[in-house]
Every structure is written in C-alpha cells, then in structure tokens.
Image: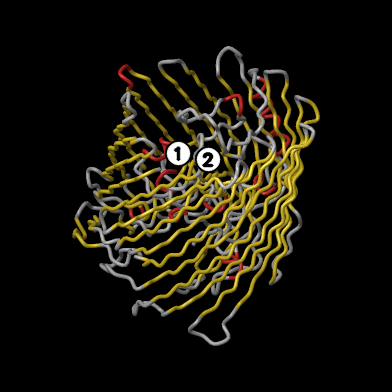
Amino acid sequence: MTFGSPLGLGRTVTKRIFFILFVALCARSAFAVSEAELDSLYNDFRIDEVEVTARALAKDIIVPQTLKGEELQRLNALTVADAIRYFSGVQIKDYGGIGGIKTINVRSMGSQHTAVYYNGVQLGNAQNGQVDLGRFSLDNLEEIQLFNGQKSDIFQSAREFGAAGNVYLTTRKPYFKNNERVHVRAQMRFGSFALANPNVGVDVKLTDALSLTFDAEYVYSDGKYPFRYRRVFPNGETAYDTTAIRQNGDVNAVRTELGLHHYYRTTGFWRVHAYNYWSERGVPGAIVNNVWRNGERLWDRNTFVQGQWQDEWWNRWSTRVLFKYANDYTQYKNYDERLLPSNNRYLQQEVYTSFANKVQVFNWWDVSLAYDYQFNSLNRENLLLVDSKEYFYRHSHWLSAATAFNVKEYLRMQASVLMTAVSQQPITNSQKPRFTPGIFFSLRPYPAIDLSINAFYKQSYRYPTFNDLYYTDLGNANLRPELARQHSVEIAYRKATQKYELNFGASYYYNRVTDKIIAYPKGQQFRWTMLNLGMVKINGVDAKADMSFYLPLRFVLRGRLNYTYQTAIDVTNPNDTYYGHQIPYIPWHSGSFVLSLDWQSKRGDHYGLNYSFIYVGERYSQQENIIYNYVQPWYTHDLSVYGEWPIQRYSLKANIEINNLLGQDYEVIQNYPMPKQNVRCTLAFRY
C-alpha cells in the first residue's frame, strides 16, 4: 500500500509560462497537423508490418516512448510490468516472482500520479490508487505507450488531462485479408518454477464492418525459486549468508477478454470490450529475521465492461463517448500464527462516462471540451468480527477545455485547463473544485531536418485514496490533495534512409510535489496515521535512442538504449536528519539496453536473436541515506532466440528465453529477493 494526492493553480504559473516561452522562442520549428486516424479494420491488401519505435516528431508535442508489434514480442517479458522496465525515467516496484505485485513510478512522482489506460479508458482503484501491472499479459497487446505530461492530441477525455504521466495499453485489432473470416492463435508457454501459461485467441469477421475478438489465458506457477540471503555489517563482517527457497509465492490465474469492433463510413466506429481476471496467490512477504515462510493468501476478481463510440461531422467536428462499469473483489487472509489473524473482504464498484468534442475552427486552430463523471464505492468487511461492514463512496467530476495552434510550419502549441470536483461519504475535509493548467510547445528550427524542441509546464494532483482516508488505525479524514508541478524540456531527432533509421531524444525535467501524503508512526507498533508532509524536489535527465540498420542478405540489426539520471530529495524541514536526502527507492542512475538481430529467408522463414540488459543503481530503502538503509545496485542480462515458419496459411513459432543469464542475486524492494537464472519456452500456432 502506498500513499499520495493533488491541488489547484499555483502562484508561480505566470513565471513558469514565461520560462517555457523563452525556451520556445530560442528556436523555430515546423510541424504537420496531427489528426487521429482511425485504424483500418479490414484491408483487401495489407503490407507486412514494419516496426517503428518512435512516431514522427512532427506529430507529437511530447514524443512518447513506444513498444509495439514484433519489438514488444521480442522482449524477455511476460507482463506489461516486465516490458515497461525498458522505458527511461521509470521505476517498477516488484515484490518478486510471477505473482508479486508490480506498480509503476514515472519520474519519481509516485504510482498514484501515473494513470494507466486500457483501450483509452483509465484503469481505476479508488481503494489504494495503484494498478498492478503484473496481471496484464502481453499476449493480447498490440502497443504500449508512455507519455510524460499528457497525450499530444487534445481530443481526449477530461480525465486524461489530470495525470502527471499516462501509460496506454492497446489490445490487438483484427486484420483480415481477401476472403479471410477467421483467425486462430494457440500458444503454450512453460518454464522455470513450474510455469504453465497456455493462451488462445480467436478473431471472427461477422460482417464487412463488424468483427469479434476473444482471448483467454491461464497462468500457474508454484513460485518456488532459490535465493541467497546475505547481510553484511557496516564493518564488512558477514552477519549471515545462506541459500533458501522462496515460499508462498504461487499464483493461479485466469484471464478472459471479449471484444466487438464496428467501423462504418470512413469516420465512425464503436467498440465494446469485456475483461475478467481471477487469481489466487500467496503473498510471500519479506525475508527478515530468518523467517522464510508467510501464511498470507490473496484472492482477486477484476471485471469490467467498457465501450467507445466516435464519429466526425462536417469534417471539422469530432465527438467521442466512453463508458465503463467495473466490479473488483479482493479477499485477504492471514494464517500466520506470528501475526494477528485477519480475513478481510473488499468490493469496489466503478461507473464512468465521458463526453468529448473537438472542433477545427481553422486549419491551424483546434479547440476541445470534455466532461467526465465517475462514481466509486468500496465495501469493506472483516469476516472475523460481527457487524464490521463499512461503506464508502465518491463522486468525481472532471471538466476540461483545451486548444491547439499551428503557427505556419514552425511552431505547435497546446494549452489546457482541468477542473476537478470530488464529493464523498463519509464527509471529509471540504475540498473546493481545483483547477490545474498545462501548456505545451513544439518547435522545429530547420524544416529540412527532423529535429524538434519540445517543452511543457503542467500541474496535476490527486485526492487521497479510501485507504488514506479511512483505513483502520491509519486513515486521516482531513488529508489535503497532493499537488505536483512538472517542468520539462526535450530535444528529439529522427533520421531515416533506406539503410538505417535513427531516433534520439533527451529531456531535462524538474518536478515539485507538495502536501505529500505519508504514513507516520503514532508511537505504538502497528499503529500509524496519515499526514500531509512537506515538499519533494525532483530533477532528472532522460536520454533514449532507437536504431535500426538494414544489412545485406536480409539481416536487420536493431538497438534500443535508455538512460536516466535523477535526484528526488526531501526538502520539508531543515531540522530533519534526512533533509536533502534522496527519497526511498529512487536510484540516481538507471538504464537499459536491447539489441536484436533478425533474418528472413526468401520463402518467409524468420529467425531472431535478442539480448537485453537492465541496470538500476544504488538507492536507499528509508528516508535517511545512511549505510544501514543502503540498497546495492543490480543488473540483469536476458537472452532469447526465436524462429517462425509459415506453412501456407498457417504459422508456427518457437521461442526460448533465458532470464537473469548470469544468475545474479538482487532485490528490487528490500527483503524481497528476485529469481535467479530462469528459463521460459514458448510454442505458438497461428491460422
């Protein structure tokens, strides 16, 4: 469980806008008007997909980080969390193994400031504000995108303007060639720690405009992997050094998805998507005081149905409607005799709708207006007590106005303001509607060169979660929202020829977070309270490069490099012993590198070799940066090889992955050991 929150207009907005204007006017740039184009559902003739790891610079004020198609499948990744590790400026909190909870933290803002969208609709969790990315498989995904600030297109729901960072997960869409009506995919993945992961998918062309998709998978693993448990005293002497087997880390999960896609005319479409996820898993817990086994169990059921309708009128007015209903059930049991017994049950429900419009006033000027409404409820029950049922609910409203300008072909600008209003029961500290602005620029100094300079300033905030406000012996009903202010300047360059393609980007960012929500001890063990406390200042540099080289004899060499340097320091109170210290689990240095070599024969056989490296530097597990809280750097090497063979209308594919090739002992979170060397094999069939 983590904590965090939001706010309104700051006194320094004007100064920040002048700062960005100064940066923007130091160069001039050209760009092309970006209009969201509908994906083509059916094609009588379709060229094989060509992988591009960055979109054309002229189309994005803030260039997103993207993984898609074959590049996404080549990574040694099982879940979305595994793949997102290869983005710059990102930290993944991983509590170990396939079943361990995995959350995302972008530019040290906290997981509650990062919104995750599934086919354009946000995944929510009003209870604790976190989304477990470990339960989203890559097998049904077409693309993952990460935007810092917000998406470049102002035609979006109001809620999308509110987050500090946005992750977009897009499921695959059906494509049919001439006379094709059915596609079938079957896949079996197995590997270390008794992993069994079958997956099946079906696409059906019902009519020329309507198609159905179905995808299902099952995941099982006993989660028993060896790890080394070693601690060293500050004087260098070994406190203990032993090897053990991770216990209670098993997972048993089933995911099913069903989608309907309908396109009409050339401008309109609607989609409906149903998702269900069920799991039972052990909670392995921390390895402390030579305790190797924990008795905690967790049951989850996550179900939602969502839809989207979009159309365009008179070639200038576009309308989009979103809706969603979600029902999430969680049960937590603790059988551990060393701890207090517990058997808690939680039921969350969510109703969400969005209505957005965009009008092209002139060819160089667009405006948009959107309104979102969401209802959240939480039922909490302690099954060990009588009459322990509690009920909380929240009404949230978002209203956004945005505009985008194209100044000839040199400058692109975007500005937005979002109003957020929240009411809830039980009534907490009264909160007035909050207004948060954002302003974005993109310039291109030399039209003949695909070079752009991008900058933005944005405010965002979040309200306390239900756990922050009401959790037993922990909540504080008077918490204020947590405000985040972001400043960012980026330079991006792209060059493409018949022999190679290069995408490069580097950005500097400065963020401030005030009224940070933290858990604070009240003096008694296991009894804490929530407080708004001070300020965190974040400075960082992200650098990323994507390269593709088209070699003789049909070889293609691809490389992807990411690096992040950042400081995130607590500047709340100069009298604190940790004043000016790096906040917990934020490394100064981190990065990743991916290298792949592909070859395709004349008959269509496809072979590939993929190597990836991830590095996370030194950091601290507590607020005080002292040797007792020091966490060592870690890195992993992963290797995979695959082959794909077309047989008439069929396709067979085999893939072997070796993860943590050198068998390094490491921990992402202190006292939660990660697996050493492990292997996964995949066999896939497509029709």
Q: SS of the residue at dot 1?
A: loop
- Give the amino acid type for the residue marked by disc 2 in the picture: Leu
Contact check, label 2 and label 1, Cβ < 8 Å: yes
- Give the amino acid type for the residue marked by disc 1 in the picture: Phe
Quarter of the view holding residue 17: top right
**Residue extending farthest front:** 179
**What residue is shown with label 2?**
146
Disc tally is: 2
The x, y position of residue 183, in whole percent, is 46, 44
On the rendered structure, is 142 left or right of 287? right
Q: How is the image coloured?
A: secondary structure
How many angstroms separate mark 2 from mark 1 (CA)? 8 Å
Vertical arrangement, residue 96 with respect to residue 362, above or below: below
Q: Is residue 223 visible?
A: yes
Q: Is residue 155 visible?
A: no
Give the residue displayed 47% in from the left and 24% down from the top.
Answer: 503
**What residue is shown with label 1?**
87
Vertical arrangement, residue 39 with respect to residue 260, above or below: above
